[in-house]
Image (cartoon, rainbow, N blue to C red):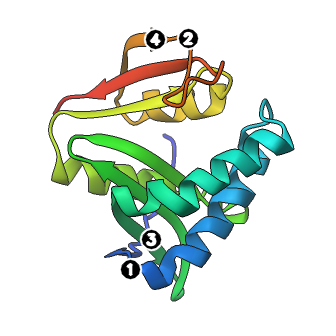
Amino acid sequence: MKETKPMIQNNILRASSNDHPDILSIWYRSVKATHLFLTELDIQTLYHGLKTQWLSSVELWVIEHHQRIVGFIGFDEHKIEMLFVDEPYQGQGFGRQLIDFAKTRYDPLFLDVNEQNPAGFAFYQKQGFTLIGRSATDAQGNPFPLMHMQYIQ
């Protein structure tokens, strides 16, 4: 029988604008580690959008571990617009905890994941999301295909 590790509960708190510098740093490190299809110019362009528009346009929550922000999630109604875990903390259950938190807030729950991010797609499938569609570009019209996913309790 497979042994399961006990899940450590971490604080998930509503983010404030004071958290934005930490969130931006986490986003940058996470994207550099997981979105290998993006050029540095792509990353800088997206970073600017995140900093100037997108962080303030979503319901934003952070997850803390030992009083340090290690990840975040942003919602727009029933859609997860962003979910990132700091690179050194990936694979330790923080993303799953954020998804479980999202599931308690919204049903159904939607998200988009980059087609060039197969690990992200696999993660969301493991969390119970199913593929419901695809688009050839991202929300900004860039040639980064998105896979649209849905979770229903």
Front-most of 21 and 4? 21
Compute the Cα span from label 2 to label 1.
34 Å
Q: Residue at x 37, y 23 (%)?
A: 149
Classify 10 Å Cα crowding around label 3: few (below 14), some (14-19), many (20 and above). Answer: many
Contact check, label 4 and label 3, Cβ < 8 Å = no
Q: Secondary structure at mark 1?
A: loop
Residue 5, placed above or below residue 151: below
User: What amino acid type should be assigned to the residue bearing mark 1?
Assistant: Ser
Indicate left or right for 116 with 77 as reference: right
Residue 133, placed above or below residue 12: above
Residue marked by disc 2: 136
Farthest-out residue, right? 40
Indicate left or right for 29 with 53 as reference: right
Residue marked by disc 4: 134
Mark 4 or mark 1: which comes first in sequence?
Answer: 1
Compute the Cα span from label 4 to label 3.
29 Å
Contact check, label 4 and label 2, Cβ < 8 Å = yes
User: What amino acid type should be assigned to the residue bearing mark 3?
Assistant: Ile
Residue marked by disc 1: 16
Task: Name the image quarter holding the C terminus.
Answer: top left
Contact check, label 1 and label 3, Cβ < 8 Å = no
User: What amino acid type should be assigned to the residue bearing mark 4?
Assistant: Arg
Compute the Cα span from label 2 to label 3.
32 Å
Residue 119 percent coordinates (x, y): 64, 32
Residue 91 percent coordinates (x, y): 62, 52
Residue marked by disc 3: 63
Residue 127 visible in image? yes
Q: Residue at x 48, y 40 (%)?
A: 1
Tell me the number on the disc at residue 82. Answer: none
Compute the Cα span from label 4 to label 2.
7 Å
- Of badges 2 and 3, the one in the foreground is 2
Compute the Cα span from label 1 to label 3.
13 Å
